[in-house]
Structure formats: structure tokens, C-alpha cells
Image: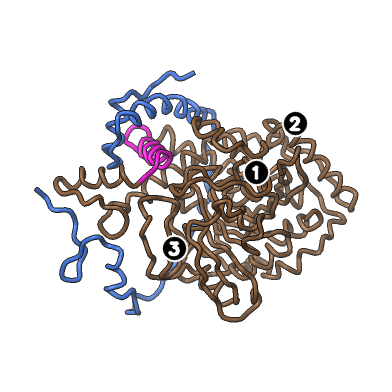
Chain colours: A blue, B brown
Amino acid sequence: MSDSVVGPDEVDHIADLARVELDDDERALFAEQFGEILSYFETLDEVPETEREPELTNVMRPDNRRESLDRDDALKNAEETEDGQFKGPRVS
Amino acid sequence: MSHNAFITEVEIDGETGPLDGKTVAVKDNISTEGVRTTCGSAMLEEYVPPYDATVVEQLKRAGATIPGKTNMDEFGMGTTTETSAFGPTENPAAPGHVPGGSSGGSAAAVASGAADLALGTDTGGSVRCPAAFCGVVGIKPTYGLVSRYGLIAYANSLEQVGPLAPTVEEAAQLLEVIAGPDERDGTTHDVRDHGTDYEYAAAADGDVDGLEIGVPTELLEGAEETVVEQFWEAIEELEGQGASYHEVSLPSLEHAVEAYYVIAMSEASSNLARFDGVRYGNSGGYDGNWNETFAKAREEGFGEEVKRRILLGTYALSAGYHDKYYKKAQDARAWVQQDFDEALDDADVLASPTMPVTPFELGESLSDPLKMYLADANTTPVNLANLPAISVPVGDDNGLPVGLQLVGPAFGEKEIIRAGSALA
């Protein structure tokens, strides 16, 4: 059933866009499965264009100062911090 | 037997209120201040939220004791609780079988008596499926009834926190505690602006005299024979109590599962971009090119199903494919909403089997993701339409529980609670 439109190279490209590294097994597995899943998604072609009523409205509030998370609490889960700030990986 | 229902067992005590003396287990994607909240993922194995979700504040204020954080499919992505990084949960009602998912730990905690009540979250059936599989009651509220503040997002436009309980009345009582507007979640509503109120427990009076039930034929077509038999027996029971039913066709439902998965995966690919290991979560301690560093941390932290959904969502939103997948899925969503609105003009509630199948054996379904997605055929349309639904236990097939789903109009929780309470 799989008319595999997505090969290992394309899986790699998507993984790159998504910032997820894959090992060889995952790359092969996804290349095998994505064709079948995507061809199932393609049955959406049969759906007629439908008018959409917006259900969501913007909810505004005055831009006043108020209490927020304590800095130490906000940094508590970070692996590395420096001078009260998050520290990202070193760029070589 | 623990059934591996909990990822973390603790005791968080509440104040005093309507839930005095009750234990309420909380799914592990709902933030608890000072108690780790993992989403069932190695990525968040050591994440300790610095604040409570609004629903957790509400539980504490109502006097509940939280006995632990329950196991779940990783980030809510699954129908069996087998994608958890903390191992699968066993179904207490059907040993050797899955409890359903993704809120499988919450349903198992209630079914085994480890907790009186539980909170789960429902993005495409994640409260109703485990309720059906474990023989308990679960409610997916109308979108906007319950605050999502502090819920770690998977697909924001679809998900709601919902109660699980042994009976409809107890589920309704817990819903009363967590329902209501929250200034920290701009999508919440006050139901009093929609011509109703929050008296949900009182609605569990079992009075179905004059109730008109619509039965969408599309939701019976793919169901197993024994499930369909149990379904009609439940409808007969409601008829015997004064309800009547008619069949109705909702052609849009044929496309609900694929629309749901395209939308949920697209939202997931964006929501889970935050997990880069810098502010929280697994970093792996890599240095070098930032993108490569993050990609390695995410390779380590995420399981296979999460990667699959992030990648498929990224693909569906990428240049050249957005119109083909995401835009068409939004059309399908609007179509499903129209179909439900029309069907609910002629019926008080719509009824179907909650799940088209009985619980899978542990390990049976992991290898075939598409098969797993198709099991959500009856639950996902309700999330697309933002409507409330309840799953009530209606019997079993050789010991494997079967659930009945009742869908109501927006903010019509009292309708589905009243109808459901005639059965459980």
C-alpha cells in the first residue's frame, strides 16, 4: 500500500527542519511509514472548501506591572545558568 | 497491584471544601508546584514546575488530596499509554491489556481504587478512551470550559482537562470544581454567558424521559460487532427509561481522523519546539553548532511516537505542503462542526460507541501507528467540533469493557451528564 513518496533523504530534511536528529533505524522506519500515513492524509483532497466562522476573539487586559515568577524559580530547571540568566550551549 | 498507574507518588494536601477526604490523581502533563511533571517523557524526567496549573489550585482549594501524578503516553501522543518513557500501565479491569490512552494512568488509578477520582486531558479522546477501556466514566468538556493554564501543551486548539470517576455523578462533581473562566487562559468562557450554570452534579438525576438521541451511522460502521451489540443494548436501556432515538448521517466524519491528526501533529511540531534543553529538560550537555546541539538533545529526550508526530507536523506545515494538508484539515474541521451543529438541532445528544474496539493486548499495537490512529475514529470528531462528550461504561465483551459516548451541544455538559447518569 505504501507508495513511498518520502524517502530517507526527505525524512532527513524534515528532521533537520524540526531540529531532531535521527538514528539509522528511525530514519528507515519513518521512510517506510510516512508514505502510508501521508497517503491516508491525502484523502483530505475530497473535503469541500468550507466557510469558517471565527470562534476565537482577542482577550485584552491593561498593560500593568504585576507580580511574575521569581527569577531563581524561573532558572531552577536550567542545566546551566550564569549571572541570573539562562546559558545556552557553547558555540565552537 | 500498582498497575504502574503513577509516575510519581506523593501526597499533596488541600484545604477544605467539597472534595474533603477525596483523593484526586493528576495526569503528569498538568503542572504541580514542587512536584516533578514529566509528560511521560525522558525529556522532562527531572522537570519540577515552579507553579501550579489552575486546575491544581482549584483541587487544593476544594479540599482534595493529590496522591500522585499519573502515567500517560509521552506528551499525550498515544491511545494505549505504551509510549510512556516510564513503561506501560496495565488495565486493572482487563489484566494483560492496555488501559487506553493517553490518560491511561488516571483511568487505571480510578479503576483500581488507588484514587477516588482523577484528572486527565483529552486532545483526541485521551480521557474518553481510557475511561471506556477501564470501565469508568470520563468527561471531555466543551473547549473553553476548563482552564489550560499550567497544562503542558500538545495541541492547544483541541485539548481540555477532564475528570475521570467511578460514576457520572462523581465525575460531574469534579467537573464543577475545575470549570470556570480563568484570566490566565484567554480561551476560557463563563457558561453563565451561554444561558446555563455550573450545577453539574445536580444534573446527574438519571431523568431521560423525552430525551431525543441521534445515532451517527458513520460511527457504527467501523466498530467491532460485539461493541455494536453492547451499544444497542445501552440505547434500548435508555429507551426503556423514556428516551427515543433516530439514526443520522454526518458525512464529514469520514474525514475526521485524518483532519485531527494533521492539525494535532502540526500544533505539536510548533509546541514541542520549546524543548531545547536550555531553560528546562534534557540538554545532553553538548557544545557546538546550536541547531545540531538542540537536535541531539531532542534525539535523546523524545521517544519514537513523539518524533514521528513532530516530523509529520513539520512536513504538513512546510512550504509547498501547507495548503494540501493543513488548510484542507481546517476545512474538514469546519465541516465536522457544521455537521454536528445540524445533527444537534434535531437531537439532545448524539450517541456512539466510545471506542470502535475493545482494549488491545499489551504490546499488540505498538508497531503499526496508522492502525492506532484509526482507533480514534469516534472520539477525534468531538475535539474538532469543540463539543462536550462523556464516556460511560455499558458492559463488557468477555471481560473487556465497552463504553458509550454521548456528545452534547457547546456548554451542554448538563445534557450529557443527565443522559449518562441513567446508565452509570
| Residue B320 drawn at (x, y percent) | 34, 32
* Image: B241 above or below A31: below
Q: Is residue B12 left or right of residue B37?
A: right
Q: Residue at x 46, y 53 (%)?
A: B156
Task: From the viewer's side, name the closer residue of B140 and B181.
Answer: B140
In terms of image quadrants, where is residue B247? top right
The reply to whether callout 1 and callout 2 are in contact (CB within 8 Å) is no
Dot 2: element: helix
Disc 1 residue type (three-letter)? Pro
Q: CA distance from mark 1 to mark 2?
A: 22 Å
Q: Earlier in the sequence, mark 1 or mark 2?
A: 1
In this rendering, which labeled residue sits more in front, label 1 or label 2? Answer: 1
The C terminus of chain B appears in which quarter of the rendering?
bottom right
Q: Which residue is mark 2?
A: B225
Amino acid carrying mark 2 in the image: Glu
Which residue does the numbered mark 1 point to in the structure image?
B95
* Element carrying mark 1: loop
In the rendered image, residue B72, in percent from the top left (x then y), is placed at 51, 51
Q: Residues within 10 Å of mark 2 (few under 14, many from 20)?
A: few
Amino acid identity at mark 3: Asn
Where is residue B86 drawn, in percent x and y? 45, 49
Question: In the rendered structure, which segment of residues is drawn in magenta?
Answer: B302-322
Disc 1 is attached to a residue of which chain?
Answer: B
Chain holding disc 2: B
Residue drawn where x is 89% and y is 53% of the image? B241
Magenta stretch, overall SS: helix
Q: Would you name the residue on which mark 3 appears?
A: A58
- Which residue is located at x 41 percent, y 47 percent? B268
